[in-house]
Amino acid sequence: MEQPVFHYLRSMTVLAILAIIAGVIGIVGSIIPGLPGPPVSWVGMLLAFLAKGLNSTGERMSLTLLLVWLAITIIVSILDYVIPAKFTKITGGSKAASRGALAGLVLGMFFTPIGMILGRLICAFAAELLFSGKGIALSVKAALGTFLGFITGTWLKLVTSSVMLYYIIVYAF
C-alpha cells in the first residue's frame, strides 16, 4: 500500500509537469493563431500555484501574483484584438484591410510561418485596393499598418507568456 506522502508528492509532480507543458503551449499559442497563448500560460501558473512549489528562497507563489497575472492575461488578450484594428486605422486602412488580413492569416496558416506573414500582407493590400478603391500607395500603407498591429500583438503575447513560463519554472519545482 502506498504511503499518503508519496501519493501527495506524485500528484504535485504531475501538476508541476502539466504547468510547464501549459507554459510551453502558451508560448507556441502566442505565435500560432487559434491557440490562446497567454490564457494557456496562465493555466500553467495556476497549476504551479496548486502544486505548491517553492522558489529558490523557499517562498510559495502568492495568490496576489497569480491574480495580477490573470489581470495581465485578460488585458493582453483584449489588446490582441484591439491593436491590429488601431494600427490599421492609424495608417488609413479600412475594415476591408482588416478582413483581408484575417483571410490572409487563415490562408497562410497552411504555409506557416512565412505564409501567415505574407498572406496577411498580401490579402490586406488586395482587400484595401479592391474593396476600398484606394490607390496602391494607400493600400500598401494600410497593409503595413495591419501587419505592424499583428506583429505588435504577437510580441505582446509572446513576452507575457514567456514571463509566465519563467514564473512557472521558478515555482513548479
Image (cartoon, grey):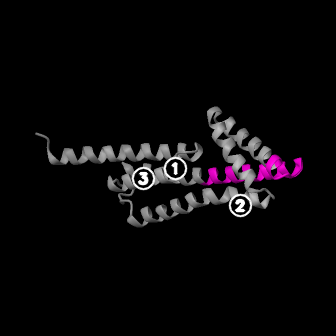
Disc 3 marks which amino acid?
Val
The reply to whether discs 1 and 3 touch (Cβ–Cβ < 8 Å) is no
Binning the other alpha carbons within 10 Å of mark 2 as few (below 14), some (14 to 19) or many (20 upward) gives some
Q: Nearer the viewer, residue 145 or 155?
A: 145
At numbered mark 3, what does the secondary structure look like: helix, strand or loop? Answer: helix
For the N terminus, the image quarter is top left
Q: Residue at x 42, y 67 (%)?
A: 64
The reply to whether discs 3 and 2 touch (Cβ–Cβ < 8 Å) is no
Magenta residues, dominant SS class:
helix
In the image, residue 109 sits, relative to residue 137, either above or below, namely above
Q: Residue furthest bottom?
A: 64
At numbered mark 1, what does the secondary structure look like: helix, strand or loop? Answer: loop
The span picked out in magenta is 129-156
- Measured from the top left, where is residue 168 in percent x and y? 43, 51
| Distance between the alpha carbons at the discs numbered 1 and 3 | 11 Å
Binning the other alpha carbons within 10 Å of mark 3 as few (below 14), some (14 to 19) or many (20 upward) gives many
Q: Residue at x 48, y 49 (%)?
A: 165
| Distance between the alpha carbons at the discs numbered 3 and 2 | 29 Å
State the residue position of label 2.
Answer: 86
Residue 148 in sight: no
Disc 1 marks which amino acid?
Pro
The reply to whether discs 2 and 1 touch (Cβ–Cβ < 8 Å) is no
State the residue position of label 1.
Answer: 36
Is 9 part of what is drawn in magenta? no
Q: Residue at x 33, y 55 (%)?
A: 50
